[in-house]
Image: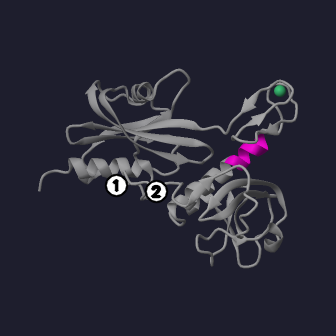
Amino acid sequence: MKRESIYKRYIPAFTREVENNHPAYWFIFNSDKLLLNPEGSYKIPLAENLNDLSIDPVRIIYLGTLAGHPSYAAEVKPGTTAPDGMVFQDLKSLYELLDEDIFLLAGRAIQIINWDKNHQFCGRCGSPTKTAEYEMGKICPECGLMNFPRLSPAVITAIVKDNGLLMAKHSYGLIDRYTLIAGFVEPGETLEEAVRREIMEEVGLEVRNIEYFGSQPWPFPHSFMIGFTAQYEKGEIKVDGKEIVDAKWFTAPEITPPPSQVSIARELINWFIENHSPEG
Ligand SMILES: [Zn+2]
């Protein structure tokens, strides 16, 4: 699986080096919308400071350097209008429009902003928290409770039987199509156990040969997708009729791939199609 690294041009850090006097990249969010400069090289605004962009922030967090420039995450009040010539655009819609490493960094920026915003006070004793100096943590000076940015791991599996790929239709899907079996990892279980449990719960099948395929950060709001392949072992397809309304085996020519070219679901489906197409 070819996934671009967030660290291609980005070096994380907690404090800006005083001798770095380059203009900074600003990842500025208005709710879930990112400020873009259609003229910019990576489309992220580059400026000495936020005054130059006529932006009045409610919070600013240093991220490290991007291509040698300091880079920051910032948040503005909802409803703020974009500076002349720039636009606020929904982060989700930028998945295939930004360079992948820039999209990943924007996803990191919005998750850090939301974490900072949602952990101003201790969840246990209610005291104001302090930001740790050398790690991404919020600490309560009264009771010592620490909070780190939350990640919610989820497993997604391509289940194969002979020349068939199992896909299911969800009742809550926004689009009416069949997708791979996926679900969040629960406390106390391993990734492989999460794969087995989700498949048993959703379609009533047992699987074997569970193999790691790849992973994908997914910042909506803080998911982390871990992809697997597995072989059908035994059982008959049985759906609950509530969460899953139907599930069946698809041969490669019967599959309509999802529209996104770079999601891990698409990569798993591509893997199946490449390895299980009927011989010509
Ligand atoms: Zn506390």
Quick one: SS at disc 1? Answer: loop
Is 257 rendered above or below residue 203?
Answer: below
Amino acid at dot 2: Glu
User: Mark 2 near mark 1, Cβ–Cβ under 8 Å?
Assistant: no
Q: Which of the image's four quarters has the C terminus?
A: bottom left
Q: Who comes first in sequence, dot 2 or dot 1?
A: 2
Numbered label tally: 2
227 relative to 205, above or below: below
**Going by the image, does 204 lie left or right of 53?**
left
Residue at (49, 54) in percent of width and height: 5
Residue 116 lies within the magenta run: yes
Which residue shows up at 57% across the image and 42% down it? 223
Q: Mark 2 points at which residue?
A: 4
Which residue is tagged 1?
256
Q: Is mark 2 on a helix, strand or loop?
A: loop
Q: Give the range drawn in magenta.
A: 112-118
In percent of width and height, residue 264 lies at 43, 48
Where is residue 109 drawn, in percent x and y? 66, 53
**Residue 243 visible (yes or no):** no
Amino acid identity at mark 1 = Thr
Q: How far apart are marks 2 and 1 (CA)?
A: 25 Å
Q: Is the magenta stretch mostly helix, strand or loop?
A: helix
Q: Residue furthest left?
A: 280
When the figure is inspected, residue 92 is found, relative to residue 45, above or below; the finding is above
Question: Looking at the picture, does residue 146 appear above or below residue 32?
Answer: above
